[in-house]
Amino acid sequence: MIRLNGVEYEYRPGLSLGDIVDDYNLSHAKVDFDACLVVIDSAAVPASEARVRLLNGDESVYIVPKLDGG
């Protein structure tokens, strides 16, 4: 089972984070990789690698907006 921002998805071999995000964006608040921080099992993933990253069986993914401020 893969969890993206608390929503569960069935794992299948070859599943990429981009596949999950595309499905997530159909029914939830839109997330993207450029304006967000991607964390997979407590490790940050560079935005340039996030979309194509293949997922393993039981991972938790959080995609949160970057906050700019001053």
Image (cartoon, rainbow, N blue to C red):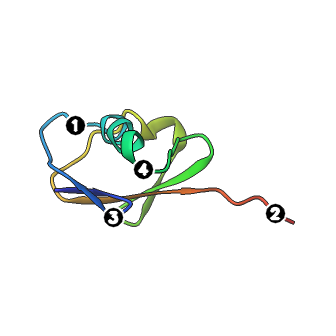
Residue extending farthest to the front is 27
Question: Which residue is labeled 2 in the image?
Answer: 69
Label 4: element kind:
loop
Q: Position of residue 6 (x, y in %)?
A: 33, 64
- Judge the density around disc 1: few (<14), some (14-19), many (≥20) Cα neighbours within 10 Å: some
Please rate how many residues cluster around mark 4, counting C-alpha atoms within 10 Å: few if below 14, some from 14 to 19, many from 20.
Answer: few
Q: Is residue 24 above or below residue 39?
A: above
Disc number for residue 28: 4
What is the quadrant of residue 35 in the picture? top right
Gap between marks 1 and 3 measured at Cα: 18 Å
Q: Position of residue 31 (x, y in %)?
A: 50, 46
- Which residue lies under the disc numbered 3? 6
Instruction: Kindly report the distance in space between the C-alpha atoms of the residues bearing marks 3 and 4.
Output: 11 Å
Among numbered discs 2 and 1, the one appearing first in the sequence: 1
Q: CA distance from mark 2 to mark 1?
A: 35 Å
Pointer 4 or 2: first along the chain: 4
Regarding mark 1 in the picture, which secondary structure is present there? loop
